[in-house]
Amino acid sequence: MVSETGQLVEGDLSAYGAKGTPFEPGDILFGKLRPYLAKYWLADRAGTAGGDIHVYRPDDGTDPKYLKYVVGSRNFVRFAEAASKGTKMPRAEWMSLREYPVVQFTQSTQRKIARYLDLATSEIDAVLARMERLGGALRARVGSVQTRAVFGLAAGQRYIAADAHSPLSGIPEHWDRTKFGYDFTESTERNGDDPPGPLLSISEYRGVELNTRTEGQQASLDVSKYRVVRPGQLAANMMWLNHGGLGVSSLTGYISPDYKAFWISDHFEPRYVHHLFRSSRYIDYFAAIATGVRPNAQRVTKTVLDATSVPLPPLDEQIRIADELDGATMRVDAMLAKVADLKSLLLERRAALITDVVTGKKEVA
């Protein structure tokens, strides 16, 4: 399920071998794992939901589309987040969610609300889709530029071949090679009583950045087991490496236990490392070696990451490549940031509209 949109990822439903909860067309599914992600969907087919998904079946007199918007409303998501338990992977349980108050509209009013929101959200979703396509085109452009630069793919160079199991398809003859585990040492620093800074996350287009959670959401987290990341360290979301989940931090802050932080050896220029692991070739490589059933929860293990081959150009070339890429990607990164900000505003507008309508704050004709 796609966060905050009420949509399902295109393609077939995931294969699920364990015992789950059957659902039917007209049921509403809600992701109880990390409920702040606001993953919900009105089923249009029968199937089985995994253990981290609630299935809500509308009672007689409750319109399924209306209930979908109730579950997707900002108030419901916040209620679920406040009622969730667990620090590393918080989950919302039914015994708490069943207490969520719902405005009792007549069924005809529910249908009217659903029709209004179908139209209003479809317009927003169409703009979001265009923003997503634009962002994809820009990211592809950046990835191509990064890949050619960080692997030394320039005219007139002489190359040596890479082995079939390496992400390197050939590097200049005068470059060395290394393994990730030789030059990147995991930091074991944990957050103490005095937080070192804000909560950080890794964006697929902006690298390490401030987390978008509100202060209230952050205050509800138990960060005692969170990892500390320092400027110049490589931060990695091990469950998101195949989506660009790495980046060199310029900030001091703390990151989720699902993340790791690595000290970078003196053999590498940190800015070169940032561009290297965010190149399309490494993203594709991590996608190929990731393990796990669900596409959005596939993990690259530390053991596999340590064995990953890494090009090691002379330090002066790393600095030159980093300088070129900093300039070349700056304009595209600014455009991606604007696209991301616009998407955030649209999603906020979408959530606020749904909340206002299903709570009766905004009447529909």
Image: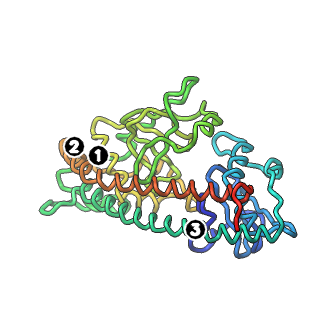
Residue 85's quadrant in the figure?
top right
> Which type of secondary structure does the marked residue at label 2 adopt?
helix
Closer to the observer: label 3 or label 1?
Answer: 3
Extreme residue in the top direction: 193
Query: Tag 2: residue type?
Result: Ile
Residue 50 seen: no
Residue that mark 2 sits on: 319
Q: What residue sits 50% from the left and 64% below the top?
A: 128
Query: How many discs mark residues in the rendered view?
Result: 3
Query: Residue 335, percent across and down?
Result: 35, 56
Q: What residue sits 55% from the left and 40% below the top?
A: 256
Q: Nearer the viewer, residue 352 or 287?
A: 352
Query: Tag 3: residue type?
Result: Val
> Which type of secondary structure does the marked residue at label 3 adopt?
loop
Query: Residue 262, percent across and down?
Result: 42, 38
Residue that mark 1 sits on: 272
Extreme residue in the right direction: 60
Residue that mark 3 sits on: 9
Picture quarter with the N terminus: bottom right
Contact, mark 1 vs mark 2 (Cβ under 8 Å): yes
The answer to which of marks 2 and 3 sits earlier in the sequence is 3
The answer to which of marks 3 and 1 sits earlier in the sequence is 3
The answer to which of marks 1 and 2 sits earlier in the sequence is 1
